[in-house]
């Protein structure tokens, strides 16, 4: 029996699932997990499309969103916008 490697990007096929996945990573607050999640979403949506929308090259995106990468905040914002996300701050009374 042959097994294949699991790739979460293969299952990120609708906006609701993508939002849930990214929000889960954001809630955990782990920087590496957030970058990985953004990279998986970009891959699921098509890295060429994201590259075109951000003005970055595909190789640069793969490098910036790879495991262990420390992309610039501007790059993260560009990719978030390209995948349909945004940052919003909510205050919750204690």
Image (tube, rainbow, N blue to C red):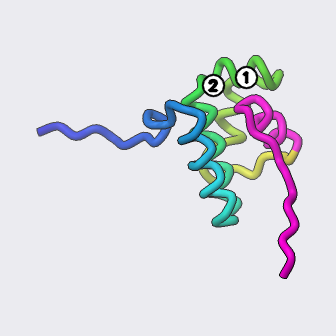
| Residue designated by label 2 | 47
- Report helix, strand or loop for mark 2: helix
C-alpha separation, residue under disc 1 versus residue under disc 2: 6 Å
Please report the bounds of the magenta region as a residue range: 74-94
Outermost residue, front side: 93
Expressed as whole percent of the image width and height from the top left, the position of residue 38 reads: 66, 43
Q: Is residue 48 above or below residue 85?
A: above
Expressed as whole percent of the image width and height from the top left, the position of residue 28 reads: 64, 66
| Residue designated by label 1 | 51
Q: Left or right: where does residue 87 sit relative to residue 41?
A: right
Q: Which residue is found at the position 86% from the left and 76% from the top?
A: 93
Expressed as whole percent of the image width and height from the top left, the position of residue 11 reads: 44, 36
Expressed as whole percent of the image width and height from the top left, the position of residue 67 reads: 60, 50
Q: Is residue 11 above or below residue 72?
A: above
Q: Left or right: where does residue 9 sit relative to residue 61?
A: left
Looking at the rendered image, the quarter that the C terminus falls into is bottom right
Q: Which residue is found at the position 69% from the left and 65% from the top?
A: 29
Q: Are marks 1 and 2 in contact (CB under 8 Å)?
A: yes
- Report helix, strand or loop for mark 1: helix
Q: Left or right: where does residue 75 sit relative to residue 61?
A: right
Q: Which residue is found at the position 67% from the left and 27% from the top?
A: 59
Within 10 Å of disc 1 (Cα), the crowding (few <14, some 14-19, many 20+) is many
**Looking at this view, is 84 or 32 the one in front?**
84
**Looking at this view, is 71 or 34 the one in front?**
34
Within 10 Å of disc 2 (Cα), the crowding (few <14, some 14-19, many 20+) is some
């Amino acid at each position: 029996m042959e097994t294949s490697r699991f790739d979460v990007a293969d299952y990120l096929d609708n906006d609701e699932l993508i939002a849930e996945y990214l929000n889960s990573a954001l809630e955990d607050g782990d920087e590496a997990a957030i970058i990985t999640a953004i990279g998986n979403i970009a891959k699921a949506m098509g890295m060429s499309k994201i590259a075109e929308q951000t003005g970055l090259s595909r190789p640069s995106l793969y490098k910036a969103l790879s495991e262990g990468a420390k992309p610039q905040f501007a790059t993260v914002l560009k990719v978030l916008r390209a995948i349909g996300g945004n940052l919003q701050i909510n205050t919750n009374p204690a």
